[in-house]
Amino acid sequence: MDLVIGPLDLPAHVDEALAVQAAAFGLGPDEVAVRRQIVLRHMTYPGARALGATTQGRLVGFVYGMPNDRTHWWSTVVEPYLRAQGHDDWLDDSFVITELHVHPGYQNRGIGRTLITTITDTVSEPRSILSAIDTDSPARGLYHSLGYQDLARQVHFPSAPKPYAVMGAPLPLRR
């Protein structure tokens, strides 16, 4: 497989990226439309960056994130859960992995691992945080193998049908 991992102009490729996310996460058109606006807004935040994985000119995976800001919506939702576990300090000096998705046809090839380690290798923050559906999944297995630990579990986001876990890891990530 001729795979290239590199910077992604996410606003210019938002529809391609969301098609990957929809395939990986089972999103319908209405949810994709909402997420499109969220992604475009996120990419205007200071320090936001994205990487893509392409093969034969086709986007098959992407990651994006930004330095955490306690005033952002995600932080305001997870903060009480982290505080209850004594981990709300993780909201400071952390780089948030906002989204990481690999098309199902390309999963289990190390693409997600390469995307997340490459993006976090370029940040100045000493640690990384993210949220993932709170189940025993390949995604959570990947995050654990990279050094992420559970900081809070059973985190409920408005309109999300399943609870999430908030995870954190010191940087650089384990290989």
Image: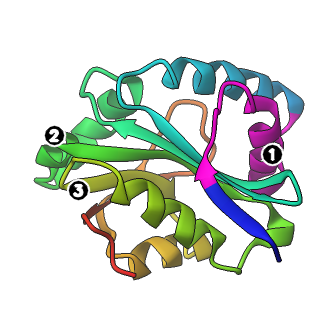
Q: Quadrant of the N terminus?
A: bottom right
Quick one: label 1, few (<14), some, or many (20+) residues within 10 Å? Answer: some
Please give the name of the residue rendered at 33% of the width and 52% of the height, measured from the top-left corner.
129
Q: Which residue is mark 2?
A: 92
Q: Secondary structure at mark 3?
A: strand
Nearest to N terminus: mark 3 or mark 1: 1
Q: Is residue 26 visible?
A: yes
* Count of numbered labels shown in the rendering: 3
Q: Quadrant of the C terminus?
A: bottom left
> Label 1 amino acid?
Ala
* Residue 132 location (% of width, % of height): 50, 56
Say the numbered circle drawn on residue 22.
1
What is the CA distance from the residue labelled 3 to the residue labelled 2? 9 Å
Quick one: label 2, few (<14), some, or many (20+) residues within 10 Å? Answer: some
Please give the name of the residue rendered at 89% of the width and 60% of the height, measured from the top-left corner.
56
Q: Secondary structure at mark 1?
A: helix
Nearest to N terminus: mark 3 or mark 2: 2
The answer to whether residue 7 is magenta is: yes
Q: Which residues are magenta?
A: 6-28
Please state if 42 lies on the left or on the right of 71 as rendered.
right
* Residue 41 location (% of width, % of height): 54, 17
> Label 3 amino acid?
Arg
Please give the name of the residue rendered at 65% of the width and 70% of the height, measured from the top-left corner.
111
* Residue 37 location (% of width, % of height): 66, 18
Q: Which residue is mark 3?
A: 127
Q: Secondary structure at mark 2?
A: loop
Please state if 84 lies on the left or on the right of 51 as rendered.
left
Front-lying residue, 159 or 146: 146
